Image (cartoon, grey):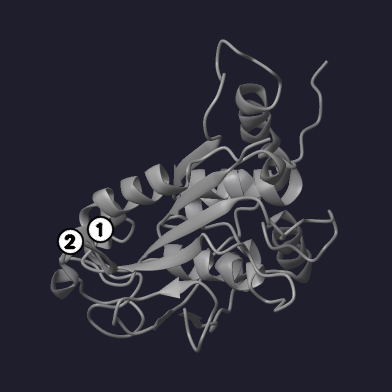
Amino acid sequence: MVSSYIADIQAAACRQATFLNFVFNMNNTNLYSSGGRCAQSSSAGSAAVAYSMAYYGSQAYLDNVEFKSGPPLSDIEQGCEVPNTIQTTVCGGSQYGCKLGGLAPWTLSPRYTDAAVGVQGWTGDSSCAAGHTTSAASNLAWLQQSIVDDGTNNPTFSYPTTAMAGWLCQSVQNNNLCTGGSGQDGGQGGSPSNDCPNNSSTQGEIFYAKLTSNPNQLPQSNYSVYAVQGCSGPEGVEDGTVPAVVIKGVIQGGTAAIENDMETNCIRPAQ
């Protein structure tokens, strides 16, 4: 007998959440015995950790989280729907926790480009960003599978005991080689894709804006969203530089900055 299966990336994220729970929250002393309980994740992996916090309770035991280039599934509807004229500004105004180091906020679309094929499979809907007008049913289903959904599955966005840092590409190293996309050379969705910006920073912004939308329920002080300059590719935060992180007078590269943040904040509070 073949069982029926409905693709739902929000539901499927229970697998990664279960793994985190198995390692950190079930007294598995062979896997974890002491110290900080922390996660470092990149791109779609950062979405997995964000899902685990919003829907599966991992914020109750994770002490620190590093989100690199994402989470890119924050609002799947905004990534998939057609037509799509949405523009999102990353760290605009005086958004809590943003650390730009003198760089300007930037504006891009949250629309999926190269990632659309993967999202089509994960959500079971081949119309995602496929060029023709999407249906109201598809748009709603994508929203309900998002990290920042419409409240259908009662997400939690208050993480008072988890230190967090987001690392988002403000610029791409070889952007001068990017042609086409967004109506002009150097634009999102241009070619070659590795030299053009993508949706990872704007989808990430949707999540971070949600976390800071309630002034009476802000994240703890060890919460930051960093702009990374000159990424090696649209999600290559490790190889860029982080102007807001200066140690002994030297602007840090992405890898050093992320490692330093993890080392500083991956601490298990005294019980």
Quadrant location of the N terminus in the rendered image: top right
The three-letter amino acid code for the residue at tag 2 is Lys
Horizontal placement of 35 versus 68: left or right?
right
Q: Is residue 249 above or below residue 269?
A: below
Foreground of the two, 223 or 21: 223
Task: Tell me residue 186's x, y (percent).
Answer: 24, 77
Q: What residue sits right under mark 1 in the picture?
A: 233
Foreground of the two, 216 or 125: 216
Task: Tell me residue 18's x, y (percent).
Answer: 68, 29
**Alpha carbons under labels 1 and 2: distance apart:** 28 Å
Numbered disc 2: secondary structure? loop
Q: Is residue 249 above or below residue 41?
A: below
Horizontal placement of 226 versus 45: left or right?
left
- The answer to whether any part of residue 151 appears in the image is yes
Closer to the camera: disc 1 or disc 2?
Answer: 2
- Residue 183: quarter of image: bottom left
For residue 248, which numbered disc appears in the image? 2
At x 38%, y 51%, the residue is: 261
Quadrant location of the C terminus in the rendered image: top right
Number of marks present in the image shown: 2
Horizontal placement of 233 versus 77: left or right?
left
Is there CB contact under 8 Å for labels 1 and 2? no
Task: Tell me residue 267's x, y (percent).
Answer: 51, 40
Foreground of the two, 120 or 188: 188
The three-letter amino acid code for the residue at tag 1 is Gly
Foreground of the two, 253 or 54: 253
Task: Tell me residue 44's x, y (percent).
Answer: 49, 47
- Residue 194: quarter of image: bottom left
Which sits earlier in the primary sequence, circle 1 or circle 2?
1
